[in-house]
Image: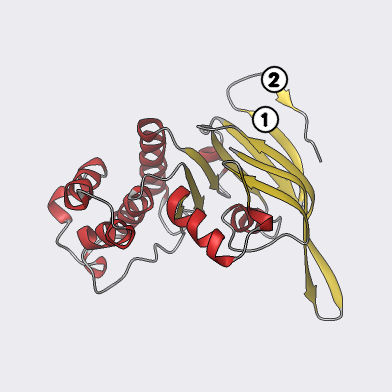
């Protein structure tokens, strides 16, 4: 489903080159729930952005659901993102002038999907916000806004869901609730879920945990099992 082969990402910092990811190779099979952890600056968010095609590696290749995205132009990448990838951000990124229901509805209307009203209502029910759909983001709590953002990410039935610190702006109780919701939706919709988190407690609840340090994979293991997967880097 997702394959990174010898991926390196280098950026210019002043007069020097800064390597954010260093020769990373990862394979994530379809339907797996993977948590990516590591200290600040370890390359977690950069990794997620590369998988989403929001940035390009300096070297190496990235394959997403059979498409070699490192060879694509922006039009092709936009098609992949709209058809195959849902993205959840730490800061929600809801449209403030639209209600919760409308925030979920709009992505489906843009793609011209059928039965969008019924699907939007179904997603509101799945995130337990049926009675809050007519509220605007400013009228919702942080946890409720993130639940709407998750429902919006699932709106187009993506094969892959990428989540960048989705619990980072929430307290521990709401953070666990959001994490549980994502696990439930992952299982119900059979999506491949890659979640970036600094919270080791939450990461240990995923099926697999990948730990980055200084741009390299230092641990890659299946949770709740004794078998450790050797890093390919």
The foreground one among 154 and 99 is 154
Quarter occupied by residue 185: top left
Q: In this view, does 135 lie above or below 189?
A: below
- Check the picture and name the quadrant holding the N terminus: top right
Residue shown at 58% from the left, 22% from the top: 224
Position of 211 with respect to 67 (left or right) is right
Residue 227: mark:
2
C-beta proximity under 8 Å, tags 2 and 1: yes
Residue shown at 28% from the left, 52% from the top: 113
Q: Earlier in the sequence, mark 2 or mark 1?
A: 1
Farthest residue in the bottom direction?
A: 14
Farthest residue in the top direction?
A: 226
Give the residue pinned by disc 1.
Answer: 221
Residue shown at 63% from the left, 59% from the top: 72
Instruction: Determine the secondary structure under disc 1.
Output: strand
Residue shown at 52% from the left, 34% from the top: 206
The percent coordinates of residue 62 (x first, y second) are 68, 49
């Amino acid at each position: 489903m997702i394959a990174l082969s010898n991926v390196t990402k280098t950026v210019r910092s002043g007069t020097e080159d800064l390597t954010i990811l260093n020769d990373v190779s990862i394979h994530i099979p379809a339907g797996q729930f993977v948590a990516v952890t590591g200290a600040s600056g370890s390359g977690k968010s950069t990794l997620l952005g590369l998988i989403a095609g929001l940035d390009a590696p300096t070297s190496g290749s990235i394959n997403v659901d059979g498409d070699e995205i490192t060879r694509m132009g922006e039009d092709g990448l936009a098609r992949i993102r709209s058809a195959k990838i849902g993205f959840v951000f730490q800061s929600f990124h809801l449209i403030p002038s639209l209600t919760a229901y409308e925030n979920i509805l709009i992505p489906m209307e843009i793609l011209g999907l059928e039965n969008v009203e019924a699907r939007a209502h179904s997603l509101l029910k799945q995130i337990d916000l049926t009675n809050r759909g007519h509220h605007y983001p400013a009228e919702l709590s942080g946890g409720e806004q993130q639940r709407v953002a998750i429902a919006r990410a699932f709106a187009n039935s993506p094969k892959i869901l990428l989540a960048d610190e989705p619990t980072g702006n929430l307290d521990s109780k709401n953070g666990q609730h959001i994490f549980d919701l994502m696990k439930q939706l992952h299982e119900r919709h059979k999506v491949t879920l890659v979640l970036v988190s600094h919270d080791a407690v939450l990461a240990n609840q995923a099926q697999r945990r990948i730990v980055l340090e200084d741009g390299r994979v230092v641990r890659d293991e299946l949770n709740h099992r004794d078998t450790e997967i050797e890093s390919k880097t």
